Amino acid sequence: MGCAGMTMTNGRPTMADVGRLAGVSIKTVSRVFNDEPHVSDSIRCRVMDAARRLDYHPNVMAQALVRRRSHLIGLVYENPSPSYVVELQRGVLDRLKDERYRLVVIPIRSVEHNASELVGMLRSAALDGVVLAPPAADHPLILDQLSRAGISCARIAPTRLFDAAPSVIIDDQVAATDIANHLLSLGHREIAIIKGDPTHPASDARMAGYTRAFAAAGVTIRPDWIEAGQFTFDSGLEAGRRLLRHAPRPTAILAQNDDMATGALMAAREFGLRVPGDVSIAGFDDSEISRIAWPPLTTVRQPVFDMAVDAADMLIAQLERRAVDGPRDHRHQLIVRASTAPPSALP
Amino acid sequence: MGCAGMTMTNGRPTMADVGRLAGVSIKTVSRVFNDEPHVSDSIRCRVMDAARRLDYHPNVMAQALVRRRSHLIGLVYENPSPSYVVELQRGVLDRLKDERYRLVVIPIRSVEHNASELVGMLRSAALDGVVLAPPAADHPLILDQLSRAGISCARIAPTRLFDAAPSVIIDDQVAATDIANHLLSLGHREIAIIKGDPTHPASDARMAGYTRAFAAAGVTIRPDWIEAGQFTFDSGLEAGRRLLRHAPRPTAILAQNDDMATGALMAAREFGLRVPGDVSIAGFDDSEISRIAWPPLTTVRQPVFDMAVDAADMLIAQLERRAVDGPRDHRHQLIVRASTAPPSALP
DNA sequence: GTGAAAGCGCTAACAA
DNA sequence: TTGTTAGCGCTTTCAC
């Protein structure tokens, strides 16, 4: 088995080394590794054998250079909710599992603030494409520069410009209407709201959904019962404290995501209020925290995992130059748990 | 401003295009972009100007090929706890923020099961280096193959082989002893344990810590009061159910992470038990969920974020060929919250 | 079926 | 201070 006078200089073996050992040209090695036809079986075996003996692995950087494909895809998000982010990543990674693509995570502090630099950064990262989570998914400047830079993208839950790039959508507004209606149908009329980060388009969409439900029920929204959070537990806690301090206290709180709803839950406890006895609290997203919270949160399921899988799928389809269908719609679903109940009779 | 007869074929401009426009050689453009000295200011300006007009950005794949650096670093983890993973990523990304490196996430279902394939995968991803979270950080085969493949690594919380590769460590065992002592000092003697995934070395280390504390206090561990989970909420819930079903019921439960402790918390509620009135529950990690849980969990802080920052720092140091110091030790800290109290007098 | 030669876009020697 | 010449390791013509 003596490797007769090999010339493999030092580091990683190259195709040339494999070719030399197998007694074929570099091109033939390339053919074998790319599963191209027109290679005799005997030679194919010889090459594979030589490669194995040398522990040869193709140099992906060289491939990337000449093929103009890095096989890197980015996931851009600004979301501060851990469970949301984890679901997002799980979904994308699940779709990428049997593909050659790798996932580069690109969390940004503020899309609003960094939009112009973002695409430059993405471009210099040599990404083949990106999955854009909200609010980046909605940003016209980003979409425009991305297409100008030739970087494919797929968007998760955009609220507009549906034709600008492949999208996976959900009707935030109807979902919000559904959960508001749930509270209304329980008999609540004194409902407070904890909005999310105003730079997320979902904030307005969900707010519009609440508003529609209230209008249809003839219930007016009290402006001082609307608080703004940032989709984080802590912001929900603080908003909850402010809301529950009000003199006629709201009988229910609608939070725009589960993390903030959990914060409101804690605020209620601080005030010695029982949930849902004294105050009902509803979230949004059906993230893991909504199951874990006590009492488990009534929420509206946004299938983040599935949407992320679909977005990754649409992105790959583009990269492989397959046809990409129109926006893929995902269904939300009202999940009634133990954090909501009819308002108790006031004293 | 007419671009007189440019030859820029079609796609992205290259250094040659910039050079042509600026009237200099490609090498000069390279010098400018690499901030090399010995370039006159006037030429530097001309080049920058031409680059701006062409919207030139260096092709990182070409750079990667010739420099043998992809500037990609991987984060390998198996941990199923969302808050742990998020902290891990946040830490690494925080250190990478002002560097040219990008983060590729590599979650693996089971290190134990995929160890041999893992390094091949990492190698074919052209990563410059990887940060290994437990349990990959402890795997001799992985460490060996990694060094053989010339991929640098930094390890988070390994429990052995401290000299095999740069490590950021914490004394899991002492931390576990501390929290066990906390329960013992409250007067608990009937203590049950929810272990984590047995393939994670932290499971044994923490168990050893508990054991030491119990032995010192002359308390014996009942084998049937030890349940195994997988570091997930659901596994903690089920383990909690099994434990609380026992006839003389434990007065306290030690869970090996916060997610499982939160599951146990829910199990206690299902049994109509009050925490900490009827049963005390303690977690491990001080992840976000421990603050959010109700009651907030007594736990022991493992500074995951800081450890991840340090690991990334050590990895970068290696990649930049700077000296890397020995294992960096991090301090744990007992965090007493509302989920533990003295056992109530039994009937 | 197989191979030689010419790049991909950049950096690294070495001249000038 | 600037430019020329070779590659990096691979794929892609296009011959044979």
Image (cartoon, coloured by chain):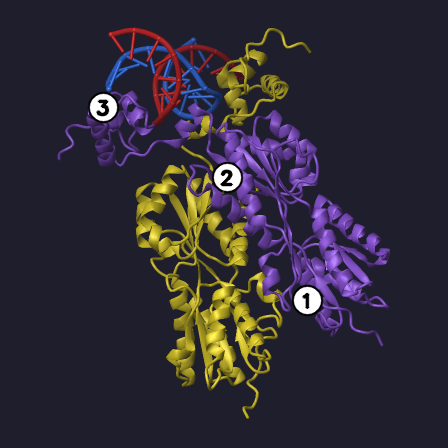
Chain colours: A purple, B yellow, C blue, D red
Residue at which label 1 appears: A339
Which label sits in the foreground, 1 or 2? 1
For mark 3, name the chain: A
Label 2, label 3: how far apart the Cα atoms are: 43 Å
Q: Which circle's residue, 3 or 1, is located before the other in the chain?
A: 3
Q: Residues within 10 Å of mark 1 (few under 14, many from 20)?
A: many
Q: Which residue is mark 3?
A: A40
Which callout, 2 or 3, points to the residue nearer the camera?
Answer: 3
On the rendered structure, is B197 left or right of B332?
left
Query: Quadrant location of the N terminus of chain A?
Result: top left
Q: Position of residue A131 (x, y in %)?
A: 57, 38
Q: Which residue is mark 2?
A: B101
Q: Position of residue A241 (x, y in %)?
A: 76, 65
Q: Residue at x 71, y 59 (%)?
A: A236
The location of residue A20, given as percent across then percent down, is 22, 24
Chain designation of label 1: A
Identity, as a three-letter code, of the amino acid under mark 1? Ser
